[in-house]
Image (cartoon, rainbow, N blue to C red):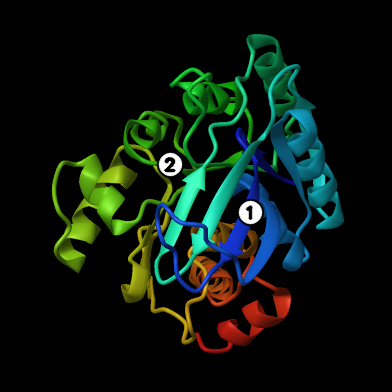
Amino acid sequence: MIYTVTFNPAVDYVVNTGEMKLGSVNRSSSEKIFFGGKGINVSAVLAELGVPSKALGFTAGFTGEAIENGVREMGIDSDFIRLPHGNSRINVKIRAKEETELNGQGPDIDKASLEKLFDKISGISDGDTIILAGSIPSSLPSDIYERILALLSGKDVRTIVDATGALLLNVLKYHPFLIKPNDKELGEMFGITINSDNDIIRYASELRRMGAKNVLVSMAEKGAMLFDENGNTHRCGVCRGTVRNSVGAGDSMLAGFAAGAVSGDFGYALKLGTACGGATAFSEGLASAQLINELLGQL
């Protein structure tokens, strides 16, 4: 079983408008509502791939109820913890000539609720996978990822971490199965600017030396590079298509890689991840199975 964790899920309210004038009344040309957060996005794409997962995390208030219902309608199995106060956040995405986002803060997560999450994670079994993705709410301890990996360190559980900076560096001692920085984030972790493939190879290899088993580096229009646990380097270009959406492409790539890695073929896992990321980028929402398969054929 693959488990995903979304500490701060959201209702994403996507508004399309021809032109956005600040300080004036603007009218939309269309609106859509999506239910997300990085872990939920991963679970949604896994469902499209026919791979079962269970979404863990926290919900609160009437927006939390909407998220729970929406996730259920997406065919995702979930086991969210209801918080006693507040409301799950609403993120507003305005798509005009430029795309503007206003992300809500979300509810505080109390200690008792956090302990409930730890209890659920403690029940994860050998052979399972857990995916931790994204930033963490201010009400949670800054070492939350470390605490989760420490909780699982005695088990044969694949841990996948998609985070940045110290949040990522501090979990390397627990030997995560996969980490996924982009090229900019890779440079920031070492206080340098990535200027070439040789830079990526050098610093991704350093992350492996520090404990990561597999390092996946996304490079936008330049594709992605994977440095696997067997010492092999894989490279994959991008899919052809028209970009329509910037939300969830990285989460989709993570889902595709996690699904593909079950086979043990890391080259295929990278291609499937690339196809999933492209399918989301070329869609208004998250990737569909049909488009994923079409794009996989390009690779």
In the displayed orientation, state which residue is furthest to the front: 24
Locate residue 20, reporting x and y percent: 44, 64
Q: Which mark is residue 68?
A: none
Question: Residue placed at 16% from the left, 64% from the top?
Answer: 198
Q: On the image, numbered disc 1 is attached to which residue?
A: 13
Quadrant in the rendering for residue 31: bottom right
Who's the residue at 64% across and 61% down the image? 259
**Corner quadrant of residue 97:** bottom left
Residue 120 vertical placement versus 276 (above, below):
above
- Residue at screen point 70% across, 23% down: 117
The answer, for residue 162, to whether it is visible in the render is yes
Marks 2 and 1: which is nearer the front? Answer: 1
Mark 1: few, some, or many residues within 10 Å (few <14, many ≥20)? some
Tell me the SS state at disc 1: strand
Q: Which amino acid type corresponds to the residue marked 2 in the rendered image? A: Ala
Q: Is residue 34 above or below residue 239?
A: above
> Which mark is on residue 163?
2
For marks 2 and 1 on the same chain, the one whose residue lies earlier in the sequence: 1
| In the image: residue 165, left or right of residue 35 | left
Q: Quick one: SS at disc 2? A: loop
Q: Amino acid at mark 1?
A: Tyr
203 left or right of 127 in image = left
In the image, is 24 to the left or to the right of 132? left
The spot of residue 61 in percent (x, y) is 76, 29
245 with respect to 89 (left or right):
left
Report x, y in % for residue 136: 50, 31
**Foreground of the two, 215 or 14:** 14
Label 2: few (<14), some (14–19) or many (≥20) C-alpha neighbours in 10 Å: many
Q: Is residue 234 visible?
A: no
